[in-house]
Amino acid sequence: MKISASFLGSKNIPNTLTRLNITDVDYIHVDVMDGKYVKNKTMSFQELSLIGNYTRKRLDVHFMVLHPLKLIDLYATLNVFCLIFHLDIQDDLEKCFQRCHDYGLKIGIAINPDDDISLVFKYLHQIDLVLIMAVYPGLPGQEFIKTTLTKINRLKDEIKNQNLNTLISVDGGINFENAKYLKDCDILVSGTTITNSNDYQDTITKLRNS
């Protein structure tokens, strides 16, 4: 299992990223919010582009925006592992996929808590990862929604039925207690559990081995 650390709830992002850089965390999870798809708005790309000054970890970028297509060219310049889109964006998903392919980037689709997991099934052959949101997007520190486990099981079955290797990532409210139920997932995205801890490496190791 891999761990992706989110810094959304951090009060000192440079310090958080510097501390994460010396751990063995697999990815840094970057939430991009436009204040329209979700109420909150994150830092501009110009500010975020400085992330390379603090960490060499690869980034998985979660677009919580209505129009991600125009952002792909920008974020492709960073050390990106995967770009993740929501199904209900106002851009053409296929065009977003093609643009990612142009840059050789992996593609993810995010599923919100109220979305039926079956909505993603027809896209599985086109994408590399499904990000299942275990909280409502946009705010850090929420509690894990338990029905997420049912979604994970249904998704696992469908991936097997289609004979694919699509990765399953889970984001939101991840802690030591619920991580033990997520052992079969490929990536756990954790924010405040890591960034509010005194020892980032110890917390990452415990999450990975829960």
Image (cartoon, rainbow, N blue to C red):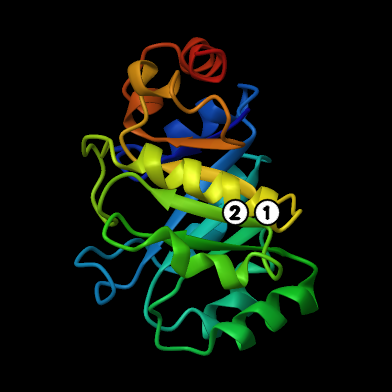
Residue 190: % across, % down: 42, 33
Q: Amino acid at mark 2?
A: Glu
Query: How many residues crowd mark 2 within 10 Å: few (<14), some (14–19), many (20+)?
Result: some
Q: Quadrant of residue 40?
A: bottom left
The residue that appears at 49% across and 19% down in the rendered structure is: 207
Q: Is residue 174 left or right of residue 83?
A: left
Q: Tell me the kind of residue under disc 1.
A: Asn
Q: Nearer the viewer, residue 191 or 92?
A: 92
Residue at the image position 25 percent from the left and 67 percent from the top: 38
Q: Position of residue 158 (x, y in %)?
A: 60, 54
Residue named by callout 2: 158
Is there any visible trace of residue 145 in the rendered image? Answer: yes
| 3D distance between C-alphas at marks 1 and 2 | 5 Å
Residue on which disc 1 sits: 161
Q: Secondary structure at mark 2?
A: helix
**Along the line of sight, the residue nearer the viewer: 134 or 50:** 134
Q: Residues within 10 Å of mark 1 (few under 14, many from 20)?
A: few
Quadrant occupied by the N terminus: top right
Which residue occupies 44% across, 50% down?
132
Q: Are marks 1 and 2 in contact (CB under 8 Å)?
A: yes
